[in-house]
Amino acid sequence: MTAPDHSLAQSAAVPAVAADPAASLAVLRAEIDRIDAAMHALLIERGEIIDRLVEVKRARAAEGGSAFRPAREASMMRMIVDRHRGILPLDTVESIWRVIISTFTYVQAPYAVHADLASGEAAMRDTSRFHFGFTVPFLAHMGAGAVVSAVAGSRGDLGLVPAFAPPGAGPWWTALEGDSAPKIIARLPFVERADHPAGLPVFCIAHPVTEGAVTEVEVWSVRVAGWNAGAARALAPLAETLAVPDRGLDGAALLISLPLAGAVGLDTVLGALRACGASVRSAALIGSHAGRYSHDAGRPARPPASSIAPAP
């Protein structure tokens, strides 16, 4: 005889409907109450484990900085998308898990989220609240440069800046070039889809993550002289690039994202720039993040070129 499965997801079949509709409703509502109580108990149990985790980190002198682990979080969100089924909308499932993850991260090591509202307040607030909930403090700034400065002056805060170049924006990413400067550690949302309720593409910035980083995509700050239309056209098929004017009429600061598993590397990009008459002044690695992971309703999620090894 096969042993019963006592997991929450399969803990009990829905009871048979009784002849009396009122009695049937009472039975089903009792089942819902039982499941709600079980979910709450599991959250309490998760909190107890987190409390033990903090004690272990303290004993190992591993405390300090942000408890954010982008590799683990990206891996968890991908698994949730892949296994989800049923009538509950995926948006709801994702937002519930984002609040659970972010809040328990905050419990381990309190942090705030600094966000650039210059390109649109509503969309950025929605993005922050969807991914980090309401327990984590939200601090608004006008401009990505102010976000980078705030994160740099903090112990373990996170910063959210648009993953595109708004009109008139300067090269905020050049402030990430120093060894001790904050770095890009994630790109949100972790799971992309056309109807995502918080689909604004943003980079997440923090002090360099020494544990749980993910390097599926490297992000480079490249400064060039002699920037021209030909150089822009040459880069378009090679890498996702943001470009803004820098240091004079013919200079440009580029933010270049390069998947490590792709066929194009930094040398290829720099070579294409030089072939078009641009002179490369500098190139600095300013972070990395998980590969973009897309999902279309009714179809399995499409994995990126490489997988993430779950962090402890």
Image (cartoon, rainbow, N blue to C red):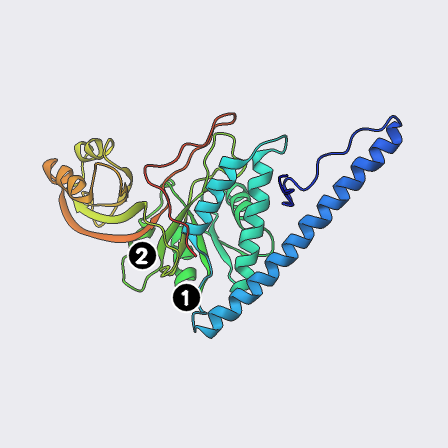
- Specify the amino acid type for callout 2: Leu
> In the image, which disc is placed on residue 176?
2
Picture coordinates of residue 229 (x, y %)? 20, 32
- Quarter holding the C terminus is bottom left
Task: Report how far apart the C-alphas of labels 2 and 1 lie in the structure.
Answer: 13 Å
> Residue at 61% across / 62% down in the picture?
48
The foreground one among 30 and 104 is 30
The answer to whether any part of residue 18 appears in the image is yes
Query: Which quadrant would residue 46 be assigned to in this image?
Result: bottom right
**Dot 1 alpha-carbon crowd within 10 angstroms: few under 14, some 14 to 19, many 20 or more:** few
The foreground one among 278 and 304 is 304
Side (left or right) of 273 relative to 163: left
Picture coordinates of residue 246 (x, y %)? 24, 48
Label 1: which secondary element: loop
Picture coordinates of residue 282 (x, y %)? 18, 52
Where does label 1 land, which residue? 153
Query: Which quadrant would residue 91 be assigned to in this image?
Result: top right
> In the image, which disc is placed on residue 166?
none
- Say which label, 2 or 1, has the lower sequence index: 1
Picture coordinates of residue 209 (x, y %)? 37, 59
> Residue at 27% across / 40% down in the picture?
261
Side (left or right) of 110 relative to 146: right
Tag 2 near tag 1, CB within 8 Å? no
- Specify the amino acid type for callout 1: Gly
Above or below: residue 231 compared with residue 220 = above
The foreground one among 196 and 211 is 211
Label 2: which secondary element: helix
**Dot 2 alpha-carbon crowd within 10 angstroms: few under 14, some 14 to 19, many 20 or more:** many
Above or below: residue 161 compared with residue 66 = above
- Quarter holding the N terminus is top right
> Residue at 44% across / 46% down in the picture?
74
